[in-house]
Image (cartoon, coloured by chain):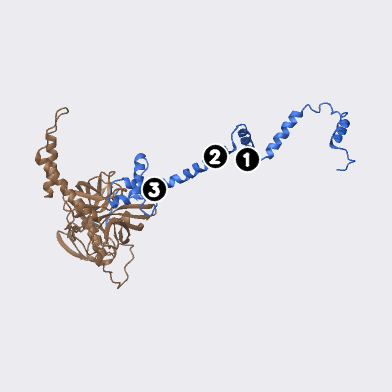
Amino acid sequence: MIRRSVSSLVAAGLAGLAWAAPVGEAPPSPPASVSGSIDALRQEMQRVFERARSAVVRIEGVDGHGPLAGSGFFVDPHGTLVTAYTIGGEAEGLTVEFGDRKHPARRLVADPRSGLALLKIEAQTPFLMSAPGPGLPELTSGVLLVGYPVDLDATPSFGIVAGHDRRYLGRYLSTTHLRANLPVQRGQGGSPLLNLKGEVIGVVISSVDNGTACFALPVAAVDKVRENYVRFGEVRHGWLGLTVEEKAGSVAIAEIREESPAKGGGLRPGDRLERVGVREIRTPEDALDASFFLTSGDPVTVRVEREGESLDLALVPADPPGKPPLHAGEPAPFRGDALFMNSAVPR
Amino acid sequence: MKPSDPSPDELIRKLLAERREIRPPDGYVDDFLERFHRRQQSEMLRTPAWKLAFERVGAAFAEFQVPRTAYAGAFAAFVVAAVIAIGLPERRSGGGAALAQADAPPAPAVAMTLAPPAAEMVLSAVMPQAAPVVRVSGGAPVPPRYVLDARPVSHDPPFSF
């Protein structure tokens, strides 16, 4: 249905070019099928926007530079919301405009590696569901952003998925990001990026090229942060202690740190990485992307090729060097209030 | 006064007879006018400004032939005008708004509660260079920094993890 609508829109554009008339002549009326397709797409977007806007909120706070404002959205019925790290990660005095009043918000998680922050208010709230599965939406898929530009009301922006990027301006992203070609304005950081079913496929992290497009963290990365919070009360990025390089069309291990999980798990320099967890490794960026989803303490299977033979090695990622270790025997806090994932928006 | 005492007329006559022979020295009255002006100026400098102004206004009005009741009438008119001028702004901010609401068509409750910010938006529209400030945080007039980063979290190689 969605793809049909988008392809109908493209067809409408082509048809529009075909019946474009020279200046001075009366333009012919568009074919009925074209205007019908456009109207169907508009109705689809309006339906998604109307359902999503109640769960999208404006967030305010104060950081070292003064007052700030951005967007965020609820992800469960108990007031847990997701926003960008630069909005909710370090600011104090956080408030969320929901309903007719401002609710004080507390910070659950601030993760600079992903660029996300989880907040919570004490209220029963509508919420958005995540798109199922770890896959990324296809290029040219239609997407809708709902956020609060500057001091204006909740606003939709429509565009398409334009890229699955791991690199930007010569630097490497923490994981694969969605690039959506749609206009964004200041204040829309932390907004949800929705598919035309109304499911969250990403969180807007930054603009691209002066707001003509945006980068969004995919929902799989958002779910990793939430799942870590539910289990541990914090985000635990895993560390293996190895460096990879591209070598003869494959990804080889260049260096292994002493006293690292990679060393203890049996990896050796020169091994060619084929898979980390469920993710295939074909380029060094693939390895970096896979590393984002490692969790400290959670075993992961690493498949390597060594002397023409494939080996599956079980490794247990550790905390990155420099992070203070957890106290031995300290139970991880259970976060039942953030368990609602992939739940439906109340209709 | 005793009966033997000379009368004032007698005294004056005697004084004039004695002074008739007195002559001032030569040049005694040459700079008389200049000295008079100097003394007048020094006298004015010692007098407060408000007193001078009062005297001059009084002297100016003294030339008009108006009845004394006119001054009282003018003062009363001034008092009435001052009372009206002071009371008018309060009526505009209070009663005037109520009047405007009574004349306006019925509006939704949300629109009514947002009336003051809407007024600010109208002013900003007249002066587009001024960003509208919506006081949403307890009346703080400082506009917030609306957040949207220019680039996502990123880092340089090597590929270590």
Image quarter in which the C terminus of chain A is found = bottom left
Give the residue pinned by disc 2.
Answer: B73
Q: Which chain does brown denote in the image? A: A
The amino acid on which the numbered mark 3 sits, given as a three-letter code, is Gly
Q: Position of residue A215 (x, y in %)?
A: 25, 49
Give the residue pinned by disc 1.
Answer: B50
Which numbered disc flags the more N-terminal residue, 1 or 2? 1
Front-most of residues B114 and A302: B114
Report whether residue A141 is seen.
Answer: no
Whether labels 3 and 2 share one chain: yes
Q: Mark 1 falls on what kind of element?
A: helix
Q: Is residue A163 left or right of residue B116?
A: left
Q: Please say if A286 is above or below A42.
A: below
Mark 3 → mark 2, Cα distance in angstroms: 31 Å
Marker disc for residue A19: none
Give the residue pinned by disc 3.
Answer: B95
The amino acid on which the numbered mark 2 sits, given as a three-letter code, is Gly
Q: Please say if B130 is above or below A306.
A: above
Report whether residue A48 is seen.
Answer: yes
Which numbered disc flags the more N-terminal residue, 3 or 2? 2
Looking at the rendered image, the disc whose residue lies closer to the viewer, 1 or 2, is 2
Front-most of residues A3 and B82: B82
